Structures are given as C-alpha cells and as structure tokens.
C-alpha cells in the first residue's frame, strides 16, 4: 500500500479542505457544492483503499442522490437559506470543542493496536466477497434497509403534509341542495 | 507515516470538523451537512478497518451506513422544509414543537 501514499495524501487533503469549506462557507449553495467535492474525494479514497463497491455506492448514493437533494432543498429555502452570522464566541466554542475531540480521538487511536495491512488481507475483498457478506452474516440488516427506506419516504411525505399551511379563508359552505328526488314522468 | 496512519488521521479530522460544524451552525440544513461529514468520517474508518483486517463484512457494513445516511438526509431535510414553512429565520432554537 506504500506506493499509493501520494494519491491517498491528495485525497485526504481534498477531503479535509472541502469539509472545512462546507462548515465555513457563508452561502448554503456553496456549502452544498463543497459537500459534493467532499463526497467525490471520499469515493476516490474508498477506491484507493480497495473498496470498489463502497466507492461506487458513495458515488451513486451520496454524490448522486443526497447532495442533489441538499441542492434542491437549499434552492427551495426562503432567502436562499442565508443564515444569521454566528457570533465569534460561537466560533471559538466550536473550535475548542473540535480540538478537544481531535485530541481525544488521536489519543484513543494511539492507544489502540498498531495498524499494518496484513499481506493475506488484501486478497479477498472483491464484489463477490461483499455480496456474500451482505447475504450471509448481514442478511437481517440488509433486509431491514428496505422497510427503513420505505418508512423514511412515507415519513417525509407525512411531515410535509402535516405542516401544510391551512387556508386563510374558510371554504364557503356549500349551498344546501335538496336531495334529488326521483320524479316519475307521467 | 504509513498510509494507514494518514487515513486514520484524516478520519479523525473529518469527524472533528463535522462536530465543529454541527456546533457552529443554527441553520438546520447546515447542521445536517455537518452531520453528513461525521457519517462520512465514520464510513472512512470502517473501510480502512476492512482493508487492514481483510474483512468483507465491514465493507458490507459501510454500504449499509450509506443507505442509513440517505434515510437520515431525507427525514432531516423534510423536517427542515417543514420548519421553514412557518418561519423565515433559520434558527433551530426557534423550533419548539413538531406538530403544525
């Protein structure tokens, strides 16, 4: 894996920079574009890490569906989704919390077992192996994604409909009509 | 520095950046984007583990995480849109109720 160090470094750099752009850019539409760059760089990282199936999934699901959904929502928002500028105290608090989290994560990683790719590990990670895992040990989780997606879809529609603004003017009561009578022609 | 350490450090940094974004913003869509970054960081770690330990199970789990992220984005964005039907000020602190 040492020959892949340079492309991996480029991918990691792009991923971190685009993530910073997502959270620091003022306009949400630029943030959505930065999220697109971020997800593309992660797909490249997955491909470099010999996970082609996850890379393709990232491309189709993340770049293709989720980011486009974000773009749609941002353009649907009133005022283009512009935000009140966060105060500098908020920025400092977020930076301090992120730094503390980063130190904790690095400490826990340093305390864990050393990383080295086992020579035998690289062999069997193709699409067939992933498929065997999906339909073997992970079958329950895999099958549960179908109802999960269905419930998410129905839930989104229900949330949207429930907040439908009620009409300002009450609908006119319909004129009471006499029930139609059956008239016999004579 | 080995490649594995580099990817590990990237994953930690992405998670921290996502957490900072979720703390920084009050706009619901911006907060959702930050949460997506955190999910991506976790997924990168899962794929790295699959690579190092040679487990195809972990790669399949990463795929399931992708699907979960899709479901989460759909519900979160629907809530954000429902939120903006009533208000124009993008501040999640204003949201006190879920019923319309």
Image (cartoon, coloured by chain):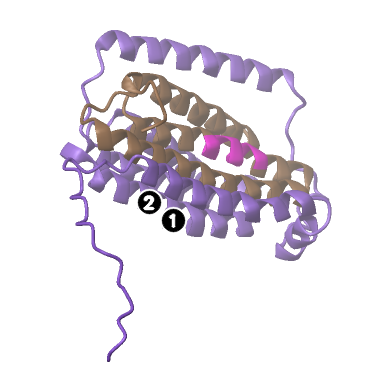
> In terms of secondary structure, where does tag 2 sit?
helix
Q: Residue B80 in the image: state x and y as whole percent.
A: 36, 36
Is A32 placed left or right of A177 in the picture? right
Contact? badges 1 and 2 (CB < 8 Å) = yes
Q: Main secondary structure of the magenta part?
A: helix
Please, what secondary structure does the residue beneath circle 1 have? helix
Q: Nearer the viewer, residue A130 or B1?
A: A130
Chain B colour in the picture? brown
Q: Which residue is mark 1?
A: A65
Q: Quadrant of the N terminus of chain B?
A: top right
Which chain does purple denote in the image?
A
Q: Chain of mark 1?
A: A
Residue position for label 2? A69
Residue A176, position in %: x, y? Answer: 23, 57
The magenta stretch is B39-46
Give me the chain letter of mark 2. A
Which residue sits at x=37%, y=46%? A161
Q: Nearer the viewer, residue B32 or B75?
A: B75
């Amino acid at each position: 894996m040492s020959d892949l160090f340079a492309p991996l470094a480029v991918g990691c750099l792009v991923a971190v920079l685009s993530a910073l752009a997502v959270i620091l850019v003022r306009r949400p539409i630029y943030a959505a574009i930065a999220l697109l760059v971020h997800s593309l760089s992660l797909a490249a990282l997955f491909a470099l890490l010999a996970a082609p199936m996850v890379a393709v999934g990232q491309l189709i699901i993340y770049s293709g569906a989720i980011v486009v959904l974000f773009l749609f929502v941002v353009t649907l928002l009133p005022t283009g989704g512009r935000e009140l500028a966060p105060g500098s105290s908020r920025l400092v608090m977020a930076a301090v919390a992120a730094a503390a989290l980063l130190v904790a994560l690095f400490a826990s990683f340093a305390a864990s077992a050393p990383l080295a790719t086992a020579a035998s590990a690289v062999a069997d990670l193709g699409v067939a192996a992933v498929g065997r895992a999906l339909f073997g040990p992970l079958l329950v989780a895999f099958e549960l994604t179908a109802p999960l997606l269905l419930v998410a879809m129905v839930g989104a529609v229900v949330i949207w409909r429930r907040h439908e603004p009620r009409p300002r003017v009450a609908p006119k009561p319909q004129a009471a009509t006499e029930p139609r009578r059956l008239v016999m022609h004579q | 520095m080995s490649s594995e350490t580099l990817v590990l450090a990237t994953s930690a940094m992405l998670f921290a950046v996502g957490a900072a974004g979720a703390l920084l913003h009050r706009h619901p869509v911006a907060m959702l984007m930050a949460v997506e970054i955190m999910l991506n960081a976790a997924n990168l770690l899962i794929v790295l583990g699959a690579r190092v330990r040679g487990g195809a199970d972990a790669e399949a789990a990463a795929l399931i995480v992708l699907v979960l992220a899709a479901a989460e984005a759909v519900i979160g964005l629907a809530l954000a849109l429902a939120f903006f039907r009533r208000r124009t000020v993008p501040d999640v602190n204003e949201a006190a109720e879920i019923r319309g």
